[in-house]
Image: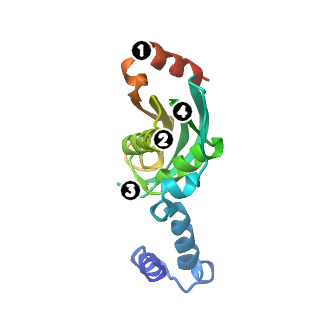
Amino acid sequence: MQKLFRQLLIELGEDPDREGLKDTPKRVTTSYKFLTQGYRQSVKEVINGALFESESDEMIVVKDIELYSLCEHHMLPFIGKCHLGYIPNGKIIGLSKTARIVDVFARRLQIQERLTKQIGNAIMEHTGARGVAVVIEAKHLCMMMRGVEKQNSSMKTSYMTGIFRSDMRTRSEFMSLIKD
């Protein structure tokens, strides 16, 4: 990767040997490895056994999970927050693991629509919940820094499964709980 980033600097018209850029290919490589670490992680690894038997059958909501991702179309960041809820069916997941699941998928080249669905499906698959709801709100630098350059725009996506999809009361309860 360092060779590629060095070549990119040359293609941009820069001198990769000048003082400020000498270590840039190395730094950018380290940065991209971190920003795309989700390719080298699995949900099972990050859950690490933190699934617990529980009689709880009420909605569990984790709100405002920060997320940082790279848009797959321009490789520019999108930044936002994820809200997720689920209704347990005998198992609950460790609280911090929900944020780690968000990161597994966010730390890949993404589109927000797919990211939302991947998070929901992972929670559903690993918990066997009666239903899962995920809402992501994000600002996309590919829309803010280039193209239409709209600074105040944001995108919201949702994914509902199980009881959140079939029961409007459950969906409405979740939506009211995640409001600011």
Measured as percent of width and height from the top left, residue 134 is found at 47, 33
Disc 1 and disc 2: Cα gap in Å? 20 Å
Q: Name the residue under label 2.
A: 123
Q: Name the residue under label 1.
A: 168
Residue at 38%, 56% (x, y): give it: 74
- Mark 2 surroundings: few (<14), some (14-19) or many (≥20) residues within 10 A: many
Circles 4 and 2, Cβ within 8 Å, touching? The answer is no
Disc 4 and disc 1: Cα gap in Å? 23 Å
Residue at 54%, 33% (x, y): give it: 90
Number of the label disc, if any, that sits on residue 74? 3
Q: Closer to the camera: disc 1 or disc 2?
A: 2
Mark with earlier residue (4, 1): 4
Q: Name the residue under label 4.
A: 90
Residue type, mark 3 in image: His
Q: Is residue 107 left or right of residue 19?
A: left
Q: Closer to the camera: disc 4 or disc 1?
A: 4
Q: Closer to the camera: disc 4 or disc 2?
A: 4
Mark with earlier residue (3, 4): 3
